[in-house]
């Protein structure tokens, strides 16, 4: 297959302009907190992107939106990875043997309530989940990690306003069986030194019957006007560039460079983490390559997507995602 023909049919584009939204002096980096005893394990998530993380778990519908901001200029950071994980309604974590409201249970191999997303042009990600329960020894909380260019820049946690949180715990099953959260941030071993920037909003949304949260998270880094082009080598095997032109009206080009002869394929995902298109692997030699993408050929509507490159060679299998938005 000719390089010029490779991967024709995918159409994505970069996001629009983002203007400064607050005084840079107001941007304080969120405190670093422990990832806890139950972090996301390497290879635990089958899907690279996954924003609906409920799987089989039942409980109060909960939407979490995080906005990632760079501390140097107080602007949003696009194309960064956000991982999130928390316990279920009864205080148990997937992937481990943990203690919750009904004793110790082995949930090894499970992946519920763990997710991964890439920030859009506004630096935002949104997860669909259930409201976390509480367990002995900790106040209710959610873990998250932010990566820029594949490098972890912040691991932290957030909690919720007490009144709204306990409204869920006392009026909605199965939380109501166990009542209010007995812990508080003053005695909690993570939040006892303060909760500045670590209390998300919690508001009931009557339209979706969900409790929705929002938190602006400032991390070390620089935000950008428009889509940030995060260039880095993944596994030392390739470099993936941002598409150009950016934005586009149907046809664009994605550049990438291979360090070794490899099989290369692309997957296209919507922001719910669902794969909506796939281009089969083709063998390419070492060097620079340009992929022409066409939205119409994949029958995809305009909107924001993530494109993921998969590079497979004798050394291993490597991936990288970037976010783009197709416009008319």
Image (tube, rainbow, N blue to C red):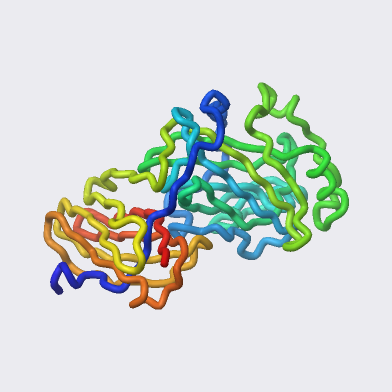
Residue pictured at 63% horizontal, 47% vertical: 86
Q: Is residue 213 above or below residue 30?
A: below
| Quarter holding residue 36 | top right
- The quadrant in which the C terminus is found is bottom left
Q: Quadrant of the N terminus?
A: bottom left
- The image shows residue 243 at horizontal and vertical percentages of 30, 56
Nearer the observer, 100 or 133 = 133
Q: Residue 313, percent across and down?
A: 21, 59
x and y percentages locating residue 272 in the rendered image: 53, 62
Q: Compared with residue 324, is residue 35 higher up or lower down, i.e. above or below?
A: above
Percent coordinates x, y for residue 127 in the rendering:
59, 54
Left or right for 318, reference 123: left
- Left or right of 214? Residue 115 is left
Vertical placement of 227 versus 303: above or below? above
From the viewer's perspective, tell me whether residue 108 is left or right of residue 165.
Answer: left
- Number of disc labels: 0
Q: Is residue 195 above or below residue 327?
A: above
Give the residue at x 42% y 32%: 221
Residue in the picture at 49% in, 53% down:
117
Front residue (pair 195, 11): 11
């Amino acid at each position: 297959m000719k390089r010029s023909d490779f991967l024709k049919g995918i159409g994505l584009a970069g996001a629009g302009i983002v203007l400064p939204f607050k005084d840079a002096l107001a941007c304080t980096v969120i405190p670093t907190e422990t990832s806890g005893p139950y972090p996301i394990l390497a290879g635990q998530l089958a899907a690279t992107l996954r924003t609906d993380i409920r799987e089989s778990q039942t409980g109060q519908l909960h939407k979490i939106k995080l906005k990632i901001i760079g501390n140097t200029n107080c602007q949003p950071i696009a194309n960064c990875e956000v991982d999130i994980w928390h316990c279920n309604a009864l205080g148990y974590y997937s992937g481990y043997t943990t203690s919750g409201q009904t004793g110790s249970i082995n949930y090894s191999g499970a992946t519920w309530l763990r997710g991964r997303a890439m920030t859009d042009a506004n630096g935002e990600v949104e997860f669909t989940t259930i409201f976390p329960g509480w367990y002995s020894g900790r106040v209710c909380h959610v873990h998250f990690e932010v990566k820029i260019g594949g490098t972890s820049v912040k691991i932290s946690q957030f909690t919720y306003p007490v009144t709204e949180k306990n409204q869920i715990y006392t009026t909605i099953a199965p939380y109501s069986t166990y009542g209010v959260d007995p812990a508080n941030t003053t005695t909690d071993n993570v939040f006892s030194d303060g909760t500045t920037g670590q209390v998300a909003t919690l508001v009931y949304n009557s339209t979706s019957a969900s409790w929705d949260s929002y938190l602006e998270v400032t991390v070390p880094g620089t935000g950008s006007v428009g889509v940030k082009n995060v260039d880095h080598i993944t596994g030392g095997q390739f470099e993936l560039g941002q598409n150009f032109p950016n934005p586009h009206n149907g046809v664009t080009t994605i550049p990438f460079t291979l360090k070794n002869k490899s099989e290369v394929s692309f997957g296209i995902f919507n922001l719910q983490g669902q794969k909506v298109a796939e281009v089969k692997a083709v063998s390419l030699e070492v060097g620079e390559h340009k992929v022409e993408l066409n939205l119409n050929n994949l029958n995809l509507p305009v909107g924001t997507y993530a494109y993921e490159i998969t590079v497979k060679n004798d050394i291993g299998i490597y991936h990288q995602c970037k976010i783009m938005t197709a416009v008319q």
